C-alpha cells in the first residue's frame, strides 16, 4: 500500500444551525439602500432614478419599484455580481433598456477556499436573456447549485448605439429545509478514512440520508458514496449519525449531506472540505492558519443564516458574542476547545431565547485568549 501523509484536515462544523423553511426574499427592493450596495461587486454601474444618475453617461430612468434602480453603460466589461447564494432554488429580477432589445448574459462562479468571487477567474454561462424598453421579469432556475455567485453582464451591440440596461428588484428563492441540523463535520482519521458525522435536533417525515463526494465544489456531478439510504430516526430529540468513507484517495475532496423526505423531495447541506496528500505526487497542501482571526462573514447582509468564519493558529476556545446597536448582548456561542484550523459557526438570526431578531445592524465579537475582533452584520427581513 502506498504511504499517505495527511497535511491538514479542515473541519467545518455548522453549530446551532437551525435551518427552517424559507421561501423567498428580496435584495435591496428598488435599490433604496446605501450605495454602493454592501457585499455586491460592481463595475460601471450607476444608481439611477427618474431625476438622478450617479454614473456619467447613464441616462436617468424610472425604477420598477421604489425610487432607484441600477443602470449599466454601453461597455461590455460592465457587470454586477451578487453576494454568495448558499442553497438557491432560483433568482427573479426585472430588467429593461432605454431603447431597443438587448441581451443580458448571466454567469456563475463557485465559492472556493477564498471568500469572495474571483472577478478575473473563470465564469460559467447560465444563459442569455433579453431586455427591452419595458420592465421584463426574468426567472433563472438554480436547483442543484450551491455556494455560488451570479454575474449579470449586459452585452449591447456597440457603444455608438447608446443602449443602456437597467436592473431592479432581485429576489432569491431558497430551498426549504425540513430538519434542524446542529452539526455536520468531516474529519480524516489516522487510517486515512474520512469520518462524516452529523447531528439533528429534530426530524419530521424524513426517509433517510445520502452522502455525496466530489473533487471540486460542484454538487450536480458529485457521486453518492453510501450504497443504501441511511435511515432517519425521526425523533424530536437529538440524534447523531456517522458514516466512514473508506474509498477516498489523495487530493482535495468535498462532501455534501442530502436529507430525503418521505414525499421524495430532498435538501442538501455542505460542502465540507478535506485535504489529503501522498508522497511522490505534486499536490500543493492547503495553507495552515498562521494567525487567529475572525474572517468575513457570509452572506452579509443575510436573510436567515450567516456563517461566522474564523481561523485558529493554535488550540484554543473561542467565544462569539452578538450585540445589537444598543450594545445589548443577544446571543453567545462558546464552542468546545478546538485545534488549529478553519471553522464556521452559523448564526440563524435568533437571540438567547430562540426569538427571531428583527431587521437591522448587529455586531459579532470574537475573543480567544488575547485576540479580540468585531464585525458588522446586517440582518434583513
Image (cartoon, rainbow, N blue to C red):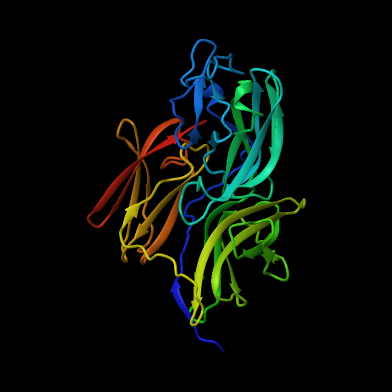
Location of residue 111 in the rendering, given as x and y in whole percent from the top left corner: 53, 51
As displayed, is residue 376 above or below residue 263? above
As displayed, is residue 156 above or below residue 86? above
Among all residues in the image, which is located at the extreme bottom? Answer: 1
| Residue sitting nearer the eye, 144 or 48 | 48
Whether residue 2 is visible: yes
* Residue occupying the point 36% across, 62% down: 289
As displayed, is residue 143 above or below residue 201? above
| Residue sitting nearer the eye, 151 or 218 | 151
Location of residue 92 in the rendering, given as x and y in whole percent from the top left corner: 66, 32
* Residue occupying the point 40% across, 46% down: 296
Q: Quadrant of the N terminus?
A: bottom right
Whether residue 237 is visible: no
Location of residue 65 in the rendering, given as x and y in whole percent from the top left corner: 59, 18
Among all residues in the image, which is located at the extreme top? Answer: 51
Q: Please identify the quarter of the rendering in which residue 133 is found.
A: top right
Amino acid at each position: 500500500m502506498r504511504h499517505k501523509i495527511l497535511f491538514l484536515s479542515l473541519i467545518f462544523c455548522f453549530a446551532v444551525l437551525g435551518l427552517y423553511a424559507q421561501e423567498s426574499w428580496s435584495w435591496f427592493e428598488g435599490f433604496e439602500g446605501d450605495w454602493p450596495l454592501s457585499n455586491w461587486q460592481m463595475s460601471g454601474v450607476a444608481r439611477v432614478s427618474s431625476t438622478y444618475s450617479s454614473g456619467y453617461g447613464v441616462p436617468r430612468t424610472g425604477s420598477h419599484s421604489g425610487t432607484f434602480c441600477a443602470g449599466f453603460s454601453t461597455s461590455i466589461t460592465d457587470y454586477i455580481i451578487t453576494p454568495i447564494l448558499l442553497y438557491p432554488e432560483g433568482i427573479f429580477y426585472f430588467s429593461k433598456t432605454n431603447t431597443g432589445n438587448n441581451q443580458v448574459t448571466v454567469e456563475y462562479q463557485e465559492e472556493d477556499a477564498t471568500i469572495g468571487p474571483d472577478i478575473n477567474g473563470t465564469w460559467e454561462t447560465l444563459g442569455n436573456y433579453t431586455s427591452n424598453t419595458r420592465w421584463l421579469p426574468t426567472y433563472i432556475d438554480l436547483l442543484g447549485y450551491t455556494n455560488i455567485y451570479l454575474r449579470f453582464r449586459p452585452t449591447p451591440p456597440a457603444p455608438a448605439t447608446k443602449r443602456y440596461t437597467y436592473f431592479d428588484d432581485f429576489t432569491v428563492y431558497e430551498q426549504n429545509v425540513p430538519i434542524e441540523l446542529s452539526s455536520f463535520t468531516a474529519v480524516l482519521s489516522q487510517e486515512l478514512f474520512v469520518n462524516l458525522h452529523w447531528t439533528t435536533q429534530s426530524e419530521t417525515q424524513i426517509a433517510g440520508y445520502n452522502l455525496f463526494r466530489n473533487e471540486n465544489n460542484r454538487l450536480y456531478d458529485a457521486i453518492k458514496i453510501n450504497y443504501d439510504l441511511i435511515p432517519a430516526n425521526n425523533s424530536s430529540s437529538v440524534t447523531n449519525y456517522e458514516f466512514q468513507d473508506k474509498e477516498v484517495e489523495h487530493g482535495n475532496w468535498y462532501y455534501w449531506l442530502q436529507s430525503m423526505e418521505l414525499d421524495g423531495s430532498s435538501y442538501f447541506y455542505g460542502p465540507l472540505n478535506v485535504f489529503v496528500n501522498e508522497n511522490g505526487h505534486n499536490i500543493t497542501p492547503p495553507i495552515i492558519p498562521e494567525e487567529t482571526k475572525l474572517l468575513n462573514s457570509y452572506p452579509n447582509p443575510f436573510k436567515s443564516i450567516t456563517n461566522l468564519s474564523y481561523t485558529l493558529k493554535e488550540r484554543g476556545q473561542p467565544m462569539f458574542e452578538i450585540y445589537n446597536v444598543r450594545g445589548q448582548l443577544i446571543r453567545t456561542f462558546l464552542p468546545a476547545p478546538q485545534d488549529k484550523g478553519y471553522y464556521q459557526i452559523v448564526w440563524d438570526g435568533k437571540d438567547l431565547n430562540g426569538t427571531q431578531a428583527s431587521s437591522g445592524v448587529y455586531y459579532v465579537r470574537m475573543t480567544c485568549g488575547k485576540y479580540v475582533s468585531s464585525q458588522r452584520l446586517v440582518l434583513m427581513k
